[in-house]
Image: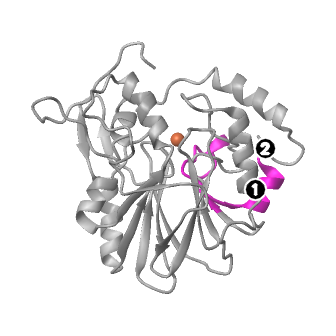
Amino acid sequence: MSDYPIDITVTPEVKAFFDEATNTISYVVKDPASSHCAVIDSVMDIDYAAGRITYDNADEIIAYVQDNGLTVDWLIETHVHADHLSAAPYIQQKLGGKIGIGEQITTVQDTFGKVFNEGTEFQRDGSQFDALFVDGDTYKIGNLEAVALYTPGHTPACMTHVIGNAAFVGDTLFMPDGGSARADFPGGDAGVLYDSIMKVLSLPGEMRLFMCHDYAPGGREIQWETTVAEEKANNIHVGEGKSKEDFIKFRTERDATLDMPKLIIPSLQVNMRAGEIPTDKDGKPMLKVPLNGL
Ligand SMILES: [Fe+2]
């Protein structure tokens, strides 16, 4: 970890927004020394059965940013989510900021461009995003330096964003009692995920970790914040005493029992376009359902 410009002495202000419909946590991360912030993993609401899009979640984030007089520098996607739709373009339109994701988005676009039989007008070069990050890339939130760490395995484009003493791990890890996310989507790999988790856990022990999801195992309250030291000691999938071999076996067997996320079909089509809704040949907003394609 010494290769990355991480400054654990800086404590950014982190405001979390929990989406009950998808168990997603979005964040506004503020530079303590200025009014600049980043929005991480925002959610657009969808009633998939009705084909209806709304923005209650995003409007809550927008109101928070405006009420606190903040300037949005970045809209970060930790990865191409399969369980919720991004609201990044909607928030960008209202508040500005650049939309950034891992450069391996191109792999995801290539895979799902084929699944959804997208034509040549669907660019697979990540150009829908304002910035594509590779491992170790840095960017500024006001005076604060953020670092993107490449942490694939759940998907090929997953990145963990380290901002001062706060790391946003996406779906690399869940809370200690939740373990880890699945690794069976196209381009996912349990062994690669294990290595990425070890990379996150090699950050300083006091580093705060912020989850993208929580499913409240055992009926406890929803939680989203832990530390590297906590995960190392107590994570039920990778904590003390668990080997990579054990993890791969467990993860692979478990993933084989999981249903597809309810919103995977709309999520992928929107999120691989940086949150833009696809349109049909007449320019109408429209989604596809590939049969037996996933
Ligand atoms: Fe995910």
Q: Position of residue 116 (x, y in %)?
A: 35, 24
Task: Report the magenta residues as a range.
Answer: 209-235
- Relative placement, left or right, of 179 versus 260 is right
Whether residue 147 appears in magenta in the rendering, the answer is no
The answer as to whether callout 1 falls within 8 Å of ligand 1 is no
Whether the residues at callouts 1 and 2 have beta carbons within 8 Å, the answer is yes
Vertical placement of residue 184 versus 285, above or below: above
- Relative placement, left or right, of 170 versus 140 is right
Task: Tell me the kind of residue under disc 1.
Answer: Leu
Q: Position of residue 121 (x, y in %)?
A: 24, 34
Whether residue 211 appears in magenta in the rendering, the answer is yes
Marks 1 and 2 sit apart, C-alpha to C-alpha, by 10 Å
Vertical placement of residue 279 versus 162, above or below: above
Which residue is at a point 83% across and 32% down the rendered structure image?
246
Per the image, the residue denoted by label 1 is: 201
Q: Position of residue 112 (x, y in %)?
A: 41, 29
Which residue is at a point 34% across and 55% down the rendered structure image?
88
Q: Residue furthest left?
A: 282
**Residue 226 picture quarter:** bottom right
**In the image shown, does 231 or 219 lie closer to the viewer?**
231
Task: Tell me the kind of residue under disc 2.
Answer: Val
Q: Secondary structure at mark 1?
A: helix
Per the image, the residue denoted by label 2 is: 238
Which mark sits nearer the N-terminus, 1 or 2?
1
